[in-house]
Amino acid sequence: MKSSLVIGLIVGLAIIFFVIYLNEDISLFLNYSGLLITIGGTLCAILIYFSYSNIRHAFSSLGQIISEKDYSEQDIIDSLIEINNEARKNGVNNITNFETYTNFPFMIEGMSLVADNMDPSFIRDVMLRENRGLTRKHNIGENVFYIAGSLSPMFGMMGTVIGLIAMLNKVQKPEEIPAAMGLALVTTLYGLILAALIFKPISGKIGIRNLRNTRLRLLVLEGILSIQRGDSNMILKERMRNINYM
């Protein structure tokens, strides 16, 4: 997923710059005051809209997309089967090196509870609460980038209006108006690029990953409880296949 994010951003920006380069002098699309209004205004509005903790959640969600490995359902099932084989061989309480089988933090936390011989109902309550908390956290991160994507075109338009007001007060000759108007409209372009290529896609990426990871955590929970019960690998797989994610 992180590779598609990076490739999408790089290729998208490259296409925009290439089209600009083919049609006009690239310097015509540089408006530093407009860029400041668009980016600075969006960031300030986000600070007003959300708390500092919400913004931290947003950048934490983005960081996880970039840095953490994507896990599939098959990855989770394979790791749980390996742990189950070890548990049936040496006893579930004797498994301590869970990192040998997986780097999925939720699974490591759950197996630690099993190794501590916690009650199954307690494990279910703790892990369901943790799952809901993680899901809400990433929902907030998704919303921060979504709102940023909604606001950036507005500030781009605001920069254009400011530029047009300044232009109409400074232009002395009517033939100078088209060139000055073109410079003012660049700010709208900045807002559209931020919204369409950066903020909204990142919001969608966080949402898709959050939905998948929520499902994977439910899968992990059922698998861990199955391991604690001493189920065979066949029963473990069957239980995970029959999970109702809704």
Image (cartoon, helix red, strand yellow):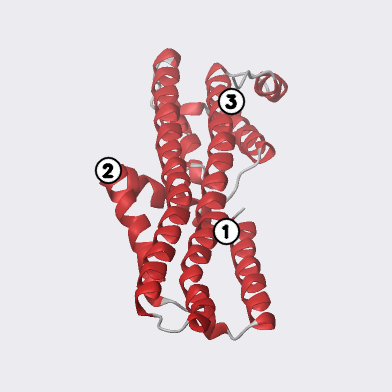
Q: Nearer the viewer, mark 3 or mark 2?
A: 2
Which residue is rendered at x = 45% and y = 59% of the image?
Answer: 157
Is residue 85 visible in the rendered structure shown here?
Answer: yes
Residue type at mark 1: give it.
Leu
Q: Could you tell me how far apart the alpha carbons at marks 3 and 2 are, in whole angstroms?
A: 36 Å
Label located before the other in sequence (3 or 1): 1
How many numbered discs, if any? Answer: 3
The circle drawn on residue 51 is 2
Residue topped by disc 3: 223
Q: x, y (%) of residue 69?
A: 56, 51
Which element is circle 1 on?
Answer: helix
Residue topped by disc 1: 197
Q: x, y (%) of residue 6?
A: 59, 63
Residue type at mark 2: give it.
Ser
Left or right of 160, for residue 7: right
Task: Please determine whether, in this image, residue 81 is positioned above or below residue 200.
Answer: above
Which element is circle 2 on?
Answer: loop
Label located before the other in sequence (1 or 2): 2
Task: Please determine whether, in this image, residue 91 is positioned above or below residue 158.
Answer: above
Kindly check if marks 1 and 2 are in contact, taking CB atoms under 8 A apart as contact: no
> Depth check: 41 or 96 in front?
41
